[in-house]
Amino acid sequence: MRVSIPASQSATLGDIAAWLDAEVSHEAATRITGAASLASATGEEMSYYDGDRKSAVTAAGTRAGLVVTNEAGRALLPATVPVVVVTDPRLGFALVLDRLYARPESAGGIHPTAVIAADALIDPSAQIGPQSVIGGGSRVEAGAEIGPGCVIGRHVVIGARTRLIGRVSVLDDSVIGARCVLQPGVVVGSDGFGLVRDGDAWRRVPQIGRVLIGDDVDIGANTTIDRGALDDTVIDDGVKLDNLIQIAHNVRIGADSAIAGCAGLAGSSEVGRHCTLGGGVGLAGHLTLTDNVHVTGMSMVTRSIHRPGVYSAGTPLDRNDRWHRNAARFKQLDRLARRVKQLEKQLGDAPTHEEDS
């Protein structure tokens, strides 16, 4: 049985329509107390539907008390179900959830088990959770929430209304902007993988840069962001990072880019604005992606990309016997390419050139 998480406040259909600057198709006074999927929503819960015909059967059977949808979706929903029609149903739904499930403002206060350096500056409206540690010279700004078990190093800045959910480590000299959310296990400002050979052994190179994180950045659980080796590692405003991402030293990520889980960005790589990297994407070091580049999941990027667009790499899953045949043929490609080039020369054809990225 599904257990609903109640909203922090309820709202009438009229309220929700007003929030979205739209009209509701049924009685405006009906009240919504939560949200759920199309399949499981009850008469007191809302959902959304984008008109996708793959979900048409589910949409036709929904019992939701309100569906945020578009014109295509309205035609496939039962006439008895109240709807609010908007251009982007998923965005509209998210905007309503922000209000229905809004978190209360921080009450402020420092838990008695927290350990705070004498010269740390804690705004009176900030909240410091149990067993958190805040180092010397650090600053926690208005409305920030430091959850239980967090470690804040020396000379760190935590911006206004930023939330560290719990067990987050923000190490020396890191700067985090306003309204950010860092999920449990995030580490910001750990040493990058800086090594140099000393004979037969490796010697660690001190990492003396910082991590600078802008405003409205979300960082998923157990993601790590290394401090710069010399220059800073920079995460710009509005960046969204999923769980289990590795950001190496001196990486720069442009504003409003989004990176899915298990991606790895090697040192000094640079991602432009409004880019997306799918799950498991790998970026080699010292390369640049221009603005509006979108790399699909499990791709390995080994050279810079200078043109906006969608890029893919890797071999998709296949039946084992067919995969083995294709793998064997792949080893023959170099020999075949040389034979084709030789034939082109014999026939007098101009050589072809790969399109530069």
Image (cartoon, helix red, strand yellow):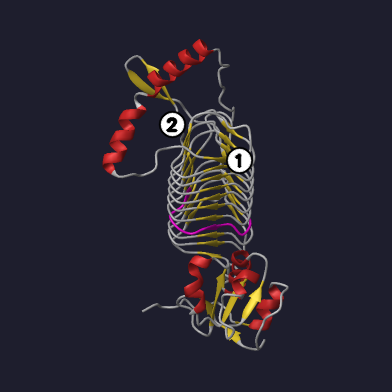
Residue where numbered disc 2 is placed: 193
Pinpoint residue 108: horizontal percent, then vertical percent: 58, 66
Residue depth check, mark 1 versus mark 2: number of the one nearer the observer: 1
**Looking at numbered disc 1 in the image, what kind of residue is underneath it?**
Gly
Task: Say which of 246 and 148 sits in front.
Answer: 246
Residue shown at 44%/20% (left/top)?
Answer: 337
Image height check: is 352 above or below 294? above
The answer to whether 271 is drawn above or below residue 92 in the figure is above
Residue located at (55% from left, 17% from top): 351
Q: Secondary structure at mark 2?
A: loop
Crowdedness near tag 1: few (<14), some (14–19) or many (≥20) residues, C-alpha within 10 Å: some
Q: Residue at x 57, y 50 (%)?
A: 120
Cα separation between marks 1 and 2:
31 Å
Evaluate whether residue 36 shows in this view: no
Q: Which residues are magenta?
A: 160-169
Q: Is residue 117 magenta?
A: no
Residue 309, label in figure: 1
Amino acid marked by disc 2: Phe
Q: Is residue 161 magenta?
A: yes
Along the horizontal axis of the image, is 159 left or right of 199? right
Q: Position of residue 314 (x, y in %)?
A: 42, 37
The residue lying furthest to the front in this view is 347
Dot 2 surroundings within 10 Å: few (below 14), some, or many (20 or more)? some
User: Quick one: label 1 or label 2, which is nearer the N terminus?
Assistant: 2
Q: Quadrant of residue 197?
A: top left
